[in-house]
Image: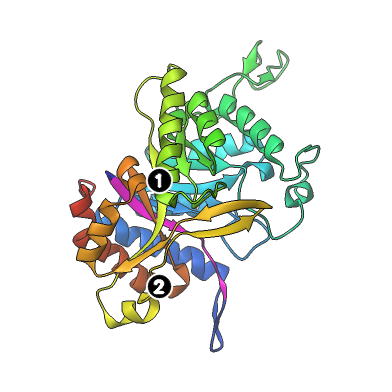
Amino acid sequence: MQRFGTLSFGHYGPLGGGRQLTAADSMLQAIDLAQGMDELGVNGAYFRVHHFARQQSSPMPLLAAIAARTKRIEVGTGVIDMRYENPLYLAEEAASVDLLSGGRLALGVSRGSPESVVRGFEAFGYTGSRDPRGADLAREHFELFLRAVEGEGLAERDPASPFGGGTGLQRVEPHSPGLRSRIWWGAGNRDSAEWAGRRGVNLMSSTLLTEADGTPFDLLQAQQIDSFRAAWREAGHEGEPRVSVSRSIFPITTAEDAMYFGGRQDGDQIGVIDGIRSTFGKTYAAEPDVLVEQLKEDAAIASADTLMLTIPSQLGVDFNLRVVESFAKLVAPSLGWEPTAG
């Protein structure tokens, strides 16, 4: 494990006891938390994207705000649902954030998670999908997005234009030359991971895998990562791709930690999602020295270069920063992590 960061679902809404976490609270707290993590040398702040839900849905303004208030931390998504995206507009937004942040954008995209509405992407104006889950639409949008990020000309110049004219094809602007190497695909199965390897993008292995044959989750995920890297090499891509996995990990260091997460340690879970029998990873919650030994045995964490800690954002900045600091100081160094240099 070379890097670690947080993956926030960005939930907001009623907290119980008459308390309310608003959308503004959620975003402003995310900025404050990222600042604190940046000072600790934590490597990344990543955000889930969900539409028609009380969660983060339009991440680019938030990522730009975090980038403006931090110096080193990577800002990113895990993942943007490509079914909902205008590929060229997303390419413009992504390039803008990447340039503003000095190349700190890690943009995870994919088909997205199961929705709270029926084919919500059609309400956004994206119709014509032949797949009940819209996977074909997501990949079509992704291919055009990738062409735009690569700087390919996509619109015919107008020779008569008063704004310069010319002939040939024009790329979208702005263009960030290094962004292509910081695009990630979120994969929930081996086929999708292999496809990402062939396309030459980084891999965000999902919090669940659409396989359930009794094999432990971490081994399934490690096999998926191996398949991805093999596909990358066979396609002839240069360099080494990045790979991330996410886990719920809570060092128990205080009575409050024990109140929230003591006894939460459980095994892998089997469930049905989107009509597919799937395996969900377990929660790790224990004293730091116990966590170190347990995480060293997690095959996927050992194989990936980046670990994302899913955080309970509703518990606020102070609590989450303490969880992250405990992990950074008491657990992560034993897994090979070193803080980002100042």
> In x, y percent, where is residue 59?
54, 52
Q: Residue at x 54, y 50 (%)?
A: 212
> In x, y percent, where is residue 287?
24, 70
Quarter of the view holding residue 329? bottom left
> In x, y percent, where is residue 253?
24, 74
Looking at the rendered structure, the secondary structure element under dot 2 is: loop
Is 196 located above or below residue 111 in the figure? above
**Left or right position of 169 against 38:** right
**Left or right position of 295 against 58:** left
* Type of secondary structure dominating the magenta stretch: strand
Instruction: Name the residue carrying label 2.
Output: 264
Q: Is residue 270 magenta?
A: no
Q: What's the mark number on residue 37?
A: none
Residue lying furthest right: 128
The residue lying toward the viewer, choosing from 12 and 334, is 334
**Left or right position of 117 against 68:** right
How packed mark 2 is, by other alpha carbons closer than 10 Å (few <14, some 14-19, many 20 or more), is some
Instruction: Name the residue carrying label 1.
Output: 219
Q: Which residues are magenta?
A: 3-13
**Left or right position of 98 against 15:** left
The residue lying toward the viewer, choosing from 283 and 113, is 283
Q: Residue at x 63, y 37 (%)?
A: 89
Name the colour scheme.
rainbow
How packed mark 1 is, by other alpha carbons closer than 10 Å (few <14, some 14-19, many 20 or more), is few
Q: Amino acid at mark 2?
A: Arg
Marks 2 and 1, how far apart in space? 22 Å
Q: Nearer the viewer, mark 2 or mark 1?
A: 1
